[in-house]
Amino acid sequence: MVKLRSLAANNPGRRANWRALGLSKEDMEKPKIAVVNSSSELAICYAHLDGIAKMVKEAIREAGGVPFEVRTSAPSDFITGAAKAGSYILAGRDIIANDIEVQVEGALLDGMICLTSCDKTPPGHLMAAARLNIPTILVIGGYQQAGEIDGEPVDVEDVWSGQVGAIFGKEPKFPIPDMAENAIMGPGVCAGMATANTMHSVVEALGMALPGHAPVRGNSPKMQANAKAAGRRIVEMVNEQLLPRQILTEAAFRNAVATVLAVSGSINAIKHLQATAIEAENGVDVFALWEEMSDVPVLCPVRPTGNIRIEQFEDAGGARAVLKRLESRISPEAMTCTGKTLAENLADYEIEGPDVIQPLDAPFSKGPSIAILKGTLADTAVVRLGVRDGSRPEEFTGTARVFEDTQSCMKAIEAGEIKDGDVVISRNQGLKGGPAMGGGASLILFALDAAGLAKTTAFVTDGQLSGLCLKGLTVAEVHPEAAEDGSPIGLVRDGDTVRISVANRSLDLDVPAEELAKRTSPGFRTEATGYLRNFRETVRPMPTGGVLIPERK
C-alpha cells in the first residue's frame, strides 16, 4: 500500500486530536480524504451540498478511507455581487484555492473531493488541485430546475434581462415579479450554458470528474449516485497515486478548449483554464490553444446561444457526448481520473441524442464560437460569437464613445446619446481597475440590447461578461487593461475610429502613434479597500488568467 502523507505526519498530538474526534487505531492507517464543501445558506447554488457531503463521506468510509469535511468561501454572482459592483465574485476564486491549501495541505491530507457548484468554485477547485497535486476528483453540483409560467419555461436569465430591459421600456415576456417567483425551483446553478455549466463541462473534459457527470440536475438521484461513485473512486486514486498533474496536461486542456467551443460556452472559461494551467506549471498557453482549435464548430447551442435547454443537453449525453463527437479532433490519449485515457472511457459509449448534439460534419454552426482578437487596441481580447448565423455583425468600424464607469454609460444609453455605428468603450473594469472585474460590463450589454442597439453598435470593455451575455458584437477582457500605464484602451478618446474584424482576429485603434504618445491612461477610478486592495496590488494580468501567484524571477 502506498505510504500516506497523513500517516507520515502522525505525531502524537495529531493522533490525540483525531482520537478525540472518534477515529480508531485502524483509521489512523487509512487514507485521509478532504471533502471540500462550499455549502452556503446565502445562495441556492450551494444549498444542497451539505446533504451531498454526507453521501460522499459515507462512500469514502465504505471504500476504506477516512473523510474530513472542510469548508471554503462560496461566491455567487447574484448574491455576493451585491457590494462593490460585483468585485468580490472573481476575487473569491482565489480565496477558495488558498483556503483549500491552508486546510488540506496544512493537514497533509492524502486526497480530496471537491463539491463544485457556482461559477468560481470549479476554477478555484481546479487551481487548488493543480497546486497541491494530490489525488483529486471534482463532484459536479448540478443545475437548478427552472420554472414555468403559462406552460413556458422561465429561468434566471429571463429575470435579469427583463429587469434591465424594463429600465429602457422594453416589455418583459412576463411580469418581472412573476418571473422572480418562478425562475428557480430547486438547488443548483443557473439553468443555461453560462459560466457554471460551462465550467462543469470543462471539469469533465479535463478528466477531473468521472465520465457522464456534467451537466446534471441539482440534487437529483443521478447527481447523488455520481457523488457516491466519486467517493469510492478517490480512495482508489490515493492508493494508485494518480495525481492532478498527470491529468492536467496540454492534451487535457486541448480537450477542454474544444468542448467550450463546441457548446459555445462562457468566455470566462478562458481565464479559469489559464489560471489552472499556471497552477499546474505545465506551460500551456490557453489563448494560443484557442486559436489552434478555432475550427471546432458549434455542436450544441444551449441557451443563451441557442434554444436547446440544459436538460436536453444532459439527456443527450452532455459533455461526454460532445467529447465523443470531437474524438477525431481532440487528444483522446489524455489521462483521466478514472485511471484510463479519454479514449478508453469513450470506447463503448453511444450518444443518446443525435439531434441535440450534432456530429462534426453536420454542426449547428461553423466555428469558432469564441475567438481571440489582437491588434493596436489589445494584445489579447475575447469575442463570443455563438451560433454564427449572420444575426450579429462580425466586422465593424465605428466611432468610439468612451465611458469611465458603468453608471455614466447606462445614463447615456437611457438618454439616447448612443447612436448606430458607435463603438461603446467601457473601461476601468479590469482585474486591477475593477478591481477583480466586477459585473458592470454585463449590465451595459443588457442595456444596449434593451435599447435596441446591440446589433447596430459594438461594445468593447476591459471587464468580464456574465456567461449569460451573448448580444451583438461584444469584445471583452481587453488586455492590457485601462488601469495599466500606456494601455491602448486607456488612451482611447471620444471620436476615435475603432475597427473590429473577426475574420482577421483583429481589434484596432485607428489613431497615429504620435497622437497616442500625447495621451495618458485614466489610472484607478474606483477605490479598493481590504481584500480588494490586496487583490489589486497582487493580481497578475489576463495572460495568466488573473492569478495571485507572484511571477517567478
Image (spheres, helix red, strand yellow):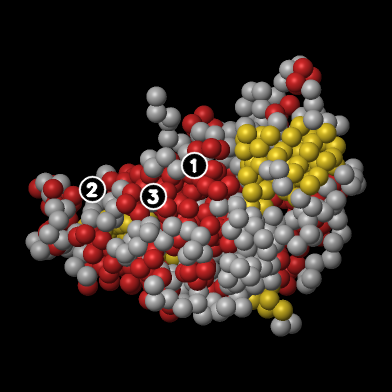
Instruction: Indicate the amino acid at tag 3.
Output: Thr
Q: Determine which residue is flagged by label 1.
A: 285
Q: Determine which residue is flagged by label 2.
A: 108
Q: Which mark is residue 249?
A: 3
Which residue appears at 54% of the width and 43% of the height?
A: 288
Say which of marks 2 and 1 sits in front.
1
Could one spot residue 152 in this view of the protein?
A: yes
Which residue appears at 55% of the width and 48% of the height?
A: 292
Instruction: Indicate the amino acid at tag 1.
Output: Asp
For label 3, the crowd category at 10 Å Cα-Cα, with few meaning under 14, some 14 to 19 and many 20 or more, is some
Q: Which picture quadrant has residue 332?
A: bottom left
For label 2, the crowd category at 10 Å Cα-Cα, with few meaning under 14, some 14 to 19 and many 20 or more, is many
Left or right: 138 in relation to 291: left
Depth check: give the residue in front, 442 or 180: 442
Could one spot residue 40 in this view of the protein?
A: no
Lower sequence index among marks 3 and 1: 3
Which residue appears at 84% of the width and 66% of the height?
A: 171
Lower sequence index among marks 2 and 1: 2
Marks 3 and 1, how far apart in space? Answer: 12 Å
Say which of marks 3 and 2 sits in front.
3
Depth check: give the residue in front, 114 or 361: 361
Given the current orientation, which residue lies at the most extreme bottom position? 151
Report helix, strand or loop for mark 2. Answer: loop
Q: Is residue 362 above or below residue 241?
A: below
